[in-house]
Amino acid sequence: MKNNNDQPNILQKLPPSFLAALTGQVVPPQEQSSDAAFYVEKGRAFLKKAALPEAVGYFQRALAIIHRFPDAATEMKKISKIYTAAAGILRKQKKTEKATELLVAAVEADPGNSKARKALASMEASQKTRLDITRNCYIFYDPRRAEAVHREAVLRALEYTSISGVIGDVMEFGVLGGWSARLFAETMRDLMVMGDLHLFDSFAGLPEYQSPVDQTSFEIAARDLWPEKMKFPEDFVAKLGSSLDEHIRQRLSRVIRKERVKIHPGFYSETLQNPPKTRVALAHIDCDLYQSAKEVLWGLFEHDIFQDGCVLMFDDWNCNKASPYFGERRAFREFLENQKRFTASDFFTYGFNGAVFILHEKRP
């Protein structure tokens, strides 16, 4: 007989306190194994006890080892239904923020959960007057073309890392208003790439041009391409109702869980003195300047964040007339020449300005 109640059986059988305590948070497993089936069995044991944060952590680790590992994906669909049902109850109780949190977690757990997606879209539409600059491309003459080009590039790069088993986080250097960060968040969600999204930016524009390489470059010496140094006007930021970085964090937390959005405000020379202790699967380097790109590459290298097989996306590769003597091209060439651990192979180019590479540990 069909059950007309929207709640899965597990919600019907559990006490009301379960719903009150339910969150979209995840507890990562402590064990280290390369066996996806091991994590699935551990996750199932926690799921039987309705310990969803722990169960999700184990299933996510299995999915990281083998992309869309069937047993883990099946269990995540069950959890997605639980989150969706719980969010429906919370919406009726007018607990909008918590309902949104659970719907975000539901779509993360099962990107094919159309019910959760529709509910989340409905809640977003009800707040359509709310400004969201992460949806706006401020740097290209044709936003629709920019969307098509960059979304495909992000998808292609993340398909490689997830299917190839390059386990780690995504890091973006150069965030501006969060437009490309949103592309990463949405693609990570839809591909079930479960790493964190680290966003590095001063949120106050470009640094002073201290390097002679930048000072004599075509974009600066000849064209003065960034007279305002990529900084939003203060009156524009004031309309956001919060700081720029907090605005981006809040908006992207409607795409992936808020715990996964890690923002690092400040210039790279500062924030990469003590970066997160993690490994990167993909680094998006959208730095414009030679000095900034150099600081990113060496900062990640010196803190052992790079790994074999990780992806480097350079968004300003062809700046300065694509000259190898300036910008990201020079910074990357010098990086490869002046350390002995990594080499790189070409992956693909995108649009008129971007290039993607894969780092490899050197072998005898």
Image: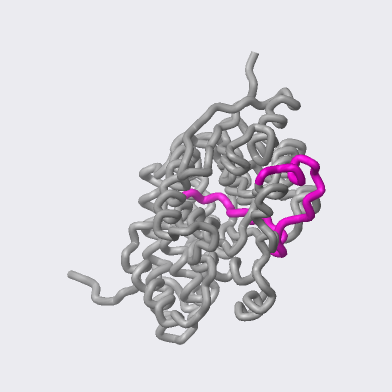
The answer to which of 147 and 359 lies nearer the viewer is 147
Specify the segment rendered in magenta.
Answer: 192-218
| Front-lying residue, 136 or 257 | 136
Asked whether residue 201 is drawn in magenta, I would say yes
In this view, which residue lies farthest toward the top? Answer: 364
Position in image of residue 353 (x %, y %): 52, 44
State whether residue 281 appears in this view.
Answer: no
Which residue is painted at 66% across and 57% down in the image?
226
User: In the depicted view, which residue is nearer to us: 230 or 303?
Assistant: 230
181 over 299 or under it: above or below: below
Q: Which residue lies most toward the left here?
A: 1
Question: Does residue 29 show up magenta in the picture?
Answer: no
Residue 13 appears left or right of 35: left
Residue at left offset 44%, top offset 72%: 14
Residue at the extreme front of the image, as rendered: 222
Q: Say how the picture is coloured.
A: one colour
Q: Quadrant of residue 214?
A: top right
Principal SS element in the magenta part? Answer: loop
Q: Quadrant of residue 128?
A: bottom left
Q: In the rendering, at what x and y percent does residue 222 appear?
A: 68, 48
Q: Residue at x 61, y 61 (%)?
A: 176
**Which sits in the foreground, 350 or 40?**
350
The residue at 60%/66% (across/down) is: 249
* Left or right of 358 in this view: 238: right
Quarter of the image containing the N terminus?
Answer: bottom left
From what the image shows, is residue 62 above or below residue 358?
below
Which quarter of the figure is the C terminus placed in? top right
Residue 157 location (% of width, % of height): 48, 41
Asked where in the image residue 200 lies, by quadrant, the reply is: bottom right
Task: Indicate the position of residue 69 as horizontal and vertical percent values.
Answer: 40, 42
